[in-house]
Amino acid sequence: MGNTNEQVHDEATDGPAVPRGQGDEEADAQRLRRITAWRRAERILSRMPVDRSLGEQLASLTAGAATVTDLDRPADIYGDGVVAELEQRIAGLLGTEAAAFFPTGTMAQQVALRCWAGRTGNATVAMHPLAHPEVHERGALPAVSGLRTVHPTTEPRLPTADEVRDFAEPFGTLMLELPLRDAGFVLPTWEELEAVVAAARERDAVVHFDGARLWECASRFGRELPEIAALADSVYVSFYKTLGGISGAALAGSASLIEEARTWRHRYGGQLFQQFPAALAALIGLDRELPKLPSYVAHAKVVAAALDEGFTQAGAGWFRVHPAPPHTHQFQVWLPYPPDVLSEASVRQAEETGVALFRRWHPAAAGPPGVSFTEVTVSEAGLEWTAEDVRAALEEFLKRVVAQA
């Protein structure tokens, strides 16, 4: 069941290893130092919203808003206006009957799973133990929604059709996180995904996609978003991760499901008076980032291969670039050093050379101490990097690792 000891390592927000509010002044100072280094870096693989100042983010939102809607229209009130426009856009993009905007993906997904528990009469949800609700939500599913979770597999990948079909316990909903972020942003093949969904149907279970990063899955599957979403009974998508929005998410599915979800959204406290900044940022992200994602995914393979070659040429010893090649525009890099050593080398490289190769490093959740990983994201800023640029930056990084170790 859910892990109540949340460990945040969101590379998109440079999130701390403990929940916000529990850090001390030194930790806050280190976080500001990292953000300053990333912001000032002349070259970086991905520019995150956190890299920009508050004023820069407001200016960007103001400049982009006029490109996605009429700014003379009334502001939204309780979900109409630009929020409703965004909901219609998502339903169209995913090919579903309807969609509902939520202030957080955690709320959207809990509502979806709660709705399905009521409709199936089974409050058990099958998911991976590395799925977001199990690792990053402090046991919310059982504590808030009265749901129980089971795990068809503990392997660092999504379950196979046989594992779903032969699982010993009954469940009403199968939740699949696409991609499975904490296992390395991994995806099955399209044929494997179809087989897993079919196996769940054989058990009379419904299928829900945790599609926080669904946008970048199309390249690996070789399918358009509506065909991917059509495999599931419901799908949640995020606006701030891949799309670089401020916050917010959407739940998409049948009209009747979304009508019920709106009721639960209100009960969960998600019926906000106004949400136009988040909705505008989401629309801007859909226009700006969605068409570019195939190029990000393709170039991530170039970056990952160059890192693998660079580690080998440098005689770095044990390392892991995972998965190889990446399934999306994000992947993991593993090294046998403590996270503070690697994080310090990363930030020093950015400060001293103006080149930011890696961001923050994190300890492995299991295994021997002294093994760490980081998440690498390749977006527009990274498209200018050649393989040689990556290898040269890696050489500079490893010099600082040796000096710190």
Image: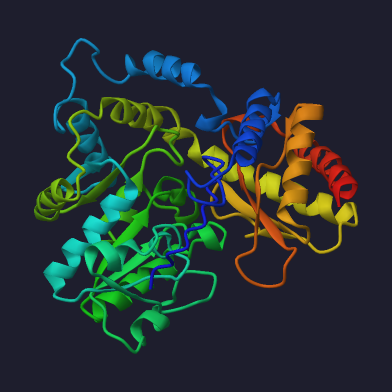
Q: Is residue 383 left or right of residue 119?
A: right
In-front residue for pair 262/283 = 262
Q: Is residue 157 left or right of residue 2?
A: right
Provide residue 38's location: percent of width, then percent of height. Answer: 65, 30
Q: How is the rendered protein coloured?
A: rainbow
Provide residue 50's location: percent of width, then percent of height. Answer: 53, 31
Q: Residue furthest front?
A: 24
Tell me: residue 315, above or below residue 346. Answer: below
Q: Residue furthest top?
A: 72
Q: Is residue 306 left or right of residue 53?
A: right
Provide residue 405's location: percent of width, then percent of height. Answer: 86, 52
Tell me: residue 91, above or below residue 130. Answer: above
Provide residue 23's location: percent of width, then percent of height. Answer: 55, 45
In-front residue for pair 19/302 = 19
The answer to whether residue 203 is visible is yes
Point out the image quarter for the N terminus. Answer: bottom left
